[in-house]
Amino acid sequence: MTRRLLTSVFVLAGVLAMGVATMAADSNLGTWKLNAAKSKFDPGPAPKTQTLKIEAWGADGVKYTSDGTDADGKPTHSDFQAKYDEKFVPFKGNPDADMIAYKRIDANTVEATTQLGGKVTGKTRIVVSADGKTRTLTQTGKNAKGQDVHNTIVYDKQ
């Protein structure tokens, strides 16, 4: 091999290795359980339970599934699959949003934007703690009833 070709092979291998390391560094992945005592829902009421399962999806995305019970004890389920590319994708099962877009800020921080009926209704900043044990969502916007939303939702890693 020529020196130039050999250098190109090493550079390509390094770029691929960095991409794999970046994917592995997504601290949002895993199973998360709502910590209602540390969360604040405004307006309420808060769900009784909620468990998130977040899996890697594709080269740079997540498959998100949420199951739980609402304040009345009725089962809830929502899901989506999104890349960190700020493109809106369907958000099934969420009464306050029918589309969501994800943007990665860093390995521990994600921003989400939600829409309902083609109109942006909310922004969420998602931060995973440095120790990887806590996932905190700070939500602002409007719910489907037109009420202002100011939620801080805390999840514990399972």
Image (cartoon, helix red, strand yellow):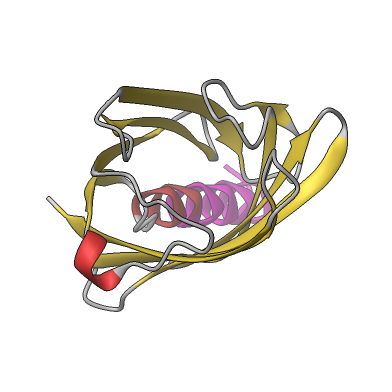
Q: Residue at x 24, y 44 (%)?
A: 48
Residue 60 locus on image (x, y percent): 55, 40
Q: Nearer the viewer, residue 1 or 127?
A: 127
- How many numbered marks, from 0 up? 0
Residue 148 locus on image (x, y percent): 69, 61
- Over which residues does the magenta segment extend? 1-18
Q: Is residue 136 left or right of residue 13?
A: left
Q: Residue at x 66, y 34 (%)?
A: 97
Residue 141 locus on image (x, y percent): 71, 59
Q: Nearer the viewer, residue 118 or 30?
A: 118
Residue 45 locus on image (x, y percent): 40, 51
Q: Residue at x 39, y 54 (%)?
A: 26
Q: Is residue 49 visible?
A: yes
Q: Is residue 5 inside the magenta stretch?
A: yes
Q: Does 19 appear above or below 108?
A: above
Question: Residue 108 appears in which quarter of the rendering?
Answer: bottom left
Question: Residue 41 appears in which quarter of the rendering?
Answer: bottom left
